[in-house]
Image (cartoon, grey):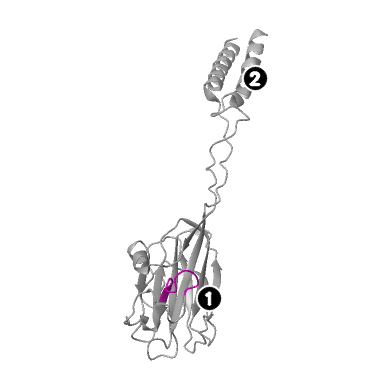
């Protein structure tokens, strides 16, 4: 009878020991395993100094068919049209001289800002434009500077967020400052692509002059799933009780065999 009671007691200890031996704080304590949620933030770029931007992390990469006399995105003088906000020349511009041939693919890469919830920007072309323009906004989840090698490739920038006047229609690109919003919802790098793949350049019927101004980011953190609940373990107390139970069980079995 004493042996049976001892076995029952040890069995109870084994069953309750997982809860007693759970690693961490006491039950009911608040877990600190979940990373704190960062408040969303905004950052703005007004393009007051394009040269400083290009020297400080922005990139202008021209993959047109023949590099033109104005191969990079540049600071205009404000005479074609004035900026959306700020000084009259405070915007980024690209024009038909991006190519000396007939195909334009001229990239302006924004520095990696982390997890990009969304971005808004303003863009326009010249008033009553008769040489249709087009611009894409693309995104790369791996970042970097791989935009492909020619007009027909985009490298790592495979995520097309918006394509303004993709049919190159007359009047299809806004000729007043117009706001656009894109929503990458991921970490990576954003890029503007002045993209006129046909009949462009100084002697073409497409491509003229576009501007981009007042770029605003909403930066956040990716959704993080809460950690899974801790799996109860036996702990040293439960393991000891289990070992004793096995020993006693072995002894009992031997006595029965001997008897």
Residue placed farthest to the top in the image? 2
Residue placed farthest to the right in the image? 1
Q: Secondary structure at mark 2?
A: helix
How many other residues sit within 10 Å of disc 1, few (<14), some (14-19) or many (≥20)?
some
Q: Which corner quadrant of the image does residue 25 belong to?
A: top right
Name the residue: 35% across, 86% down. 101
* Alpha carbons under labels 1 and 2: distance apart: 76 Å
Residue 200's disc is none
* Magenta-drawn stretch, dominant element (helix, strand or loop): loop
Please report the bounds of the magenta region as a residue range. 83-93
Quadrant containing the N terminus in the rendered view: top right
239 inside magenta stretch? no
Q: Secondary structure at mark 1?
A: loop
Q: What x and y, as percent, mark residue 178? A: 55, 74
Q: How many marks?
A: 2
86 inside magenta stretch? yes
Q: Foreground residue, 46 or 121?
A: 46
Which residue bears the numbered disc 1?
Answer: 177
Q: Which corner quadrant of the image does residue 16 belong to?
A: top right
Which residue bears the numbered disc 2?
Answer: 12
How many other residues sit within 10 Å of disc 2, few (<14), some (14-19) or many (≥20)?
few
Q: Which corner quadrant of the image does residue 15 belong to?
A: top right
Looking at the image, can residue 123 be seen?
A: yes
């Amino acid at each position: 009878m004493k042996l049976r009671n001892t076995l029952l007691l040890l069995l109870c200890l084994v069953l309750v020991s997982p809860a007693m031996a759970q690693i961490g704080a006491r039950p009911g304590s608040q877990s600190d395993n979940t990373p704190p949620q960062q408040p969303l933030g905004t950052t703005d770029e007004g393009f007051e100094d394009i040269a400083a931007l290009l020297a400080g992390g922005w990139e202008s990469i021209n993959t047109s068919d023949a590099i033109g006399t104005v191969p990079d995105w540049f600071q205009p003088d404000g005479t074609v049209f004035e900026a959306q906000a700020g000084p009259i020349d405070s915007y980024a511009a690209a024009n038909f001289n991006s190519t000396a041939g007939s195909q334009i693919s001229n990239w302006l890469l924004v520095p990696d800002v982390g997890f990009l919830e969304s971005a808004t920007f303003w863009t326009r072309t010249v008033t009553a434009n008769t040489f249709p323009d087009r611009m894409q906004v693309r995104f790369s989840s791996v970042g970097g500077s791989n935009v492909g090698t020619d007009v027909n490739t985009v490298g790592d920038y495979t995520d097309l967020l918006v394509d303004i006047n993709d049919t190159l229609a007359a009047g299809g690109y806004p000729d007043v400052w117009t706001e656009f919003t894109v929503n990458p919802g991921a970490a990576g790098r954003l890029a503007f692509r002045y993209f006129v793949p046909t009949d462009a350049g100084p002697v073409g019927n497409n491509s003229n002059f576009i501007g981009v101004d007042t770029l605003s980011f909403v930066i956040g953190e990716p959704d993080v799933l809460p950690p899974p609940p801790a799996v109860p373990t036996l702990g040293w107390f439960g393991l000891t009780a289990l070992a004793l139970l096995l020993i006693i069980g072995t002894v009992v079995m031997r006595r029965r065999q001997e008897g």
